[in-house]
Image: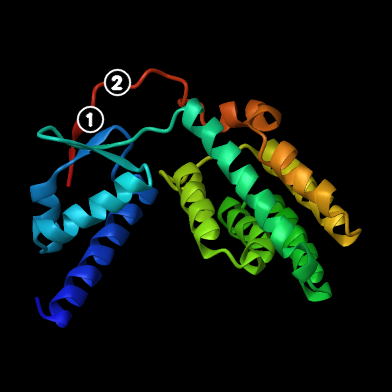
Amino acid sequence: MPKHRILNVKSLKEHVYNYLREQMQKGTIRPGSLINVNETCKKLGVSKTPLREALLQLEMEEFVTILPRRGIVVNRLNLQDIRRYYDIIGALESKALAASFSRLKPSDIKTLESLADGMDKALADDNFDLYYERNLRFHDVYLKPCDNPTLIKVVNTIKKRLYDFPRQARFVKEWELASVGEHRELLRLIREGRREAAMHFIENVHWSFRVQEVYIRKYYSDADRPAPDAEPEAG
């Protein structure tokens, strides 16, 4: 197959993947629904090959499950999933912080301070989207210097699974206020050069399912409900 054909298929796969993720984030494609392959191909004007490749990536990232001869079901998020994801993120972010700790510069500390202030301001304005953006950027300050792109990709994918599937219209303000306090405590430990304490705090407080469970149950209020039968197919 000519090289340009391979590139075309790859770009189509990315286009289809981005489309499906966007629809999931918006809530157009809902957890528990079935994805209609023929309708999706028709809507996007693509063959089944790039769609199949996009769905395989989504299955690897646990957004969907491909059921042979039955279709593609969009996975629901339950409390067991959330507990597992918190364990993974906590362990990986702790490892990333350990690797990047000595590389953080005074300018990074200032960036963390600015982002913590920005999160406070966003919550005061009830702007959760802005709060969420600054929250991600805060974590990126110590994630990016860890020099492990695979780790960063896994962490970011799981965060999308937790928060963009779909993005909740509501938010638990007391959780976000408590979270800002945790970010400031982490900042204090970093500023004081307490590497081990900062690593422990990330894994055993900030990303601890047990510590955050009361808020998690409020935010994911339907995560512990039994899953109903699959909803009609989504195109």
Horizontal and vertical percent for residue 82?
Answer: 52, 33
Dot 1 falls on a residue whose secondary structure is strand
Name the residue: 75% across, 58% down: 116
For label 2, the SS is loop
Q: Position of residue 57 (x, y in %)?
A: 30, 53
Whether residue 171 is visible to the viewer of this picture, yes or no, is no
Residue 138 versus residue 130: which sits nearer the camera? 138
Q: Residue at x 31, y 49 (%)?
A: 58
Classify residue 16 by image quadrant. Answer: bottom left
Q: How is the image coloured?
A: rainbow
Report the front residue among 121 and 116.
Answer: 116
Residue 195 appears in the picture as rendered = yes
Say if mark 1 contacts mark 2, CB within 8 Å.
Answer: yes
| Residue 32 at x, y percent in the picture | 29, 32
Alpha-carbon span between mark 1 and mark 2: 8 Å
Q: Residues within 10 Å of mark 2 (few under 14, many from 20)?
A: few
Amino acid type indicated by mark 2: Pro
Q: Residues within 10 Å of mark 1 (few under 14, many from 20)?
A: some
Indicate whether 32 appears above or below 97. above
Which one is nearer the viewer's eye here, 184 or 86?
86
In the picture, the disc for residue 231 is: 1
Q: Which residue is mark 2?
A: 228
Q: Position of residue 167 (x, y in %)?
A: 46, 46
Q: Amino acid at mark 1?
A: Glu
